[in-house]
């Protein structure tokens, strides 16, 4: 599934949910499923893994993180085909998908999140302006990708990427529409 957001999103749009709360919710969901998580990060340089391992006891649900900042690292660590990167660029849907799939294939995790983007302040192009981030999530064998564009400086883009990656993964792992849960 590909969901592309064309409009830019203010970097502070997730200010109502702080990272520790998202990580705690994620931990609870992964523990309930008995799943481990792997991260594959480019533009965030390990910030998602860092946020996850900030929570005490994260070794019960966080398996590993890949920081694949260079194209060579994406190929070597995650098995992303170099021809795919050449054809579409590192910041693209096929590469985000391949990174998420590679994180699963190269770990014992059942859930993964991958991010590749242009955090800035340089490196943007008309097709991929600064703030463009492609996400890939893999959960239980299903992969979802999405493009977002965040406004703000480098720190704001990276922080918004971490928040959005975690928030979406919590949503993917949580109760699905049409399902019921028992009241306590």
Image: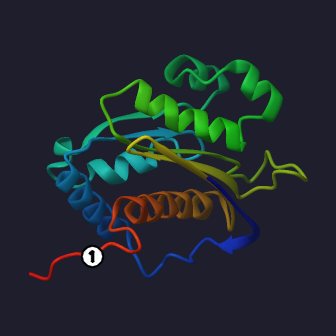
The image shows residue 111, relative to residue 68, as above or below, that is below
Residue drawn at the location 45% of the way across and 32% of the way down: 103
- Residue carrying label 1: 180
Q: Nearer the viewer, residue 76 or 32?
A: 32
The x and y percentages for residue 83 are: 75, 20
Residue 165 vs residue 81: left or right? left
Which color scheme is applied?
Answer: rainbow
Q: Nearer the viewer, residue 124 or 25?
A: 25
Residue drawn at the location 62% of the way across and 61% of the way down: 157
The x and y percentages for residue 32 are: 18, 56
Which residue ends up furthest to the left in the rendered image? 184
In what quadrant of the picture does the C terminus appear? bottom left
Residue drawn at the location 67% of the way across and 47% of the way down: 117
Classify 10 Å Cα crowding around label 1: few (below 14), some (14-19), many (20 and above): few
The x and y percentages for residue 142 are: 47, 45
Quadrant of the rendered structure where residue 84 is?
top right
Which residue ends up furthest to the top in the rendered image? 76
Residue 89 vs residue 178: left or right? right
Secondary structure beneath disc 1? loop
The x and y percentages for residue 86 are: 79, 25
Quadrant of the rendered structure where residue 160 is?
bottom right
Q: How many marks?
A: 1
The image shows residue 184, relative to residue 159, as above or below, that is below
The image shows residue 148, relative to residue 135, as above or below, that is below
Residue drawn at the location 50% of the way across and 21% of the way down: 77
């Amino acid at each position: 599934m590909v969901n592309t957001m064309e409009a830019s999103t203010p970097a502070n749009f997730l200010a109502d949910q702080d990272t520790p709360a998202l990580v705690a919710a994620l931990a609870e969901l992964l523990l309930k499923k008995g799943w481990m998580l792997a991260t594959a990060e480019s533009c965030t340089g390990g910030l998602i893994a860092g946020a996850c391992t900030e929570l005490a006891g994260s070794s019960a649900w966080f398996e590993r993180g890949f920081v694949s900042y260079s194209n060579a690292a994406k190929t070597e660590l995650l098995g992303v085909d170099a021809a795919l990167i050449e054809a579409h660029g590192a910041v693209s849907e096929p590469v985000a998908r391949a990174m998420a799939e590679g994180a699963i294939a190269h770990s014992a995790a059942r859930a993964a999140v991958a991010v590749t983007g242009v955090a800035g302040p340089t490196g943007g192009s008309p097709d991929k302006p600064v703030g463009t981030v492609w996400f890939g999530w893999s959960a239980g064998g299903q992969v979802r990708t999405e493009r977002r564009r965040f406004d703000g400086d480098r720190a704001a883009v990276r922080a918004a990427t971490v928040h959005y990656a975690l928030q979406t993964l919590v949503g993917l792992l949580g109760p699905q529409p049409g399902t019921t849960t028992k009241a306590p």
